[in-house]
Amino acid sequence: MDSTTIVAIYKTHTDAEQAVRDLQHGGFDMKKLSIVGKDYQTNEHVAGFYNTGDRVKYWGKFGAFWGGLWGLLFGAAFLFVPALGPVVVAGPLVASIIAGLEGAVTVGGLSAIGAALFSIGIPKDSVVRYEVALKANQFLLIAHATADEVTKAREILRNSSAAEVNVHPSAQPETAAAM
């Protein structure tokens, strides 16, 4: 099965959360959706993370945001990534990140997040742009699915408040079609 990846960048967690809910209401398969964002711990609140069966609980500045998303998405991780800092990931991208970390896979100067994005067919120049967005405290919404599913997601995200939406076809991994 050929797959295509769509990546949307959101400036705020509320915009990213609304996009997830729009995709859910539009019938997009939540098992194919991931979200990545930095975890800010500049405040004095206690932060925690634990897993109870298939449910992850989290507290911190964006605890309600991540908790709500973890109820919809499958897989979750809280990681410290050099050059990015604390990062929270929800969705199937977690498996790619863990596989890269366990296999010590590195891709020329990319973080573990960047290597995972590269491993699903996103070109390195786009990966670097997404890492810059994360460093700027923005959120990445990533769907890795069939071309038809990504087309449907793109139509839904076109009406969202995304700062940027890019489709990366698997057949042409060196190009990205910007919306």
Image (cartoon, helix red, strand yellow):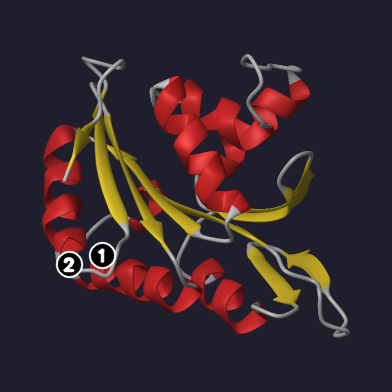
- Find residue 74 and name its label: none
Q: Is residue 87 above or below residue 172?
A: below
Q: Is residue 75 above or below residue 81?
A: below
Who's the residue at 25% across and 21% down the image? Answer: 175
- Find residue 26 and name its label: 2
Mark 1 to mark 2: distance in Å?
Answer: 5 Å
Who's the residue at 75% across and 78% down the image? Answer: 60
Circle 2 SS class: loop
Picture quarter with the N terminus: top left
Q: Is residue 29 left or right of residue 74?
A: left
Q: How many marks?
A: 2
Who's the residue at 32% across and 59% down the image? Answer: 163
Circle 1 SS class: helix
Q: Quadrant of residue 123?
A: top left
- Find residue 23 and name its label: 1
Q: Is residue 8 above or below residue 49?
A: above
The percent position of residue 48, horizontal first and vertical second, equals: 83, 72
Who's the residue at 55% across and 67% down the image? Answer: 70
Residue type at mark 2 is Gly
Residue type at mark 1 is Leu
- Badge 1 vs badge 2, beta-carbon distance below 8 Å: yes
The percent position of residue 29, horizontal first and vertical second, equals: 29, 54
The local crowd at label 2, few if under 14, some if 14 to 19, many if 20 or more residues have their Cα within 10 Å, is few
